Image (tube, rainbow, N blue to C red):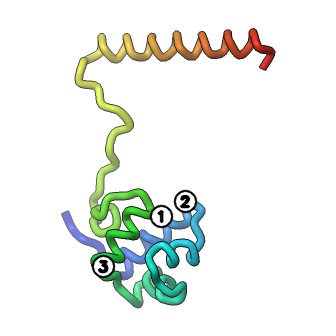
Amino acid sequence: MGYLSQQQVGQRIAELRAERGVSQRRLADALELDPSALSRVESGERGLAVGELVAAAEFLGVEIDALLSDSVEAPPLFRNDGGDDEANAAVADFTAIMDDFFTFAAALGR
């Protein structure tokens, strides 16, 4: 596993911030930084202190490795330890719940 350069970390923060629709000012406020300091972070001119890095990861809803590592794997959306039979049963249960929901919604006229 490799680590990103200061400039790449800044770019990653800018990308995550944009993906979440967060303004630079809002993230800067959350990190207790001046917006111009955050701008310098995102451009790679300034690094983050450890506390700022932790706060950025928490605010953006990612692990710190997602900000620093060049090979972060996305966690699975769900885990299936029970095999195909358990997975098929879970899908069937979910489908039944959704069918009941739509039947109920239709009965209410929605």
Secondary structure found at label 2:
loop
Identified by mark 2, the residue type is: Arg
In this rendering, the answer to whether 34 lies above or below 110 is: below
Please rate how many residues cluster around mark 2, counting C-alpha atoms within 10 Å: few if below 14, some from 14 to 19, many from 20.
few
> Which quadrant holds the C terminus?
top right
CB of mark 1 within 8 Å of CB of mark 2? yes
Q: Which of marks 3 and 1 is in front?
A: 1
Q: Where is residue 16 in the image (x, y as percent from the top left)?
A: 48, 64
Secondary structure found at label 1:
helix
Q: Quadrant of residue 100?
A: top right
Indicate which disc residue 20 carries: 2
Identified by mark 3, the residue type is: Ser
Q: Position of residue 44 (x, y in %)?
A: 41, 85
Indicate which disc residue 16 carries: 1
Residue at 44% over, 64% down: 59
Please rate how many residues cluster around mark 1, counting C-alpha atoms within 10 Å: few if below 14, some from 14 to 19, many from 20.
some
> Which quadrant holds the N terminus?
bottom left
Residue at 24% over, 71% down: 3
- Distance (Cα) linking label 3 and label 1: 16 Å
Q: Position of residue 78 (x, y in %)?
A: 35, 33
In this rendering, the answer to whether 87 lies above or below 63 is: above
Residue at 47% over, 88% down: 37
Residue at 38% over, 62% down: 58
- Distance (Cα) linking label 2 and label 3: 23 Å
Locate residue 68 relative to residue 15 in the image: left or right: left
In this rendering, the answer to whether 66 lies above or below 105 is: below
Secondary structure found at label 3:
loop
In this rendering, the answer to whether 83 lies above or below 36 is: above
- Distance (Cα) linking label 1 and label 2: 6 Å
Q: In which quarter of the image is residue 66?
A: bottom left
Residue bearing mark 3: 5
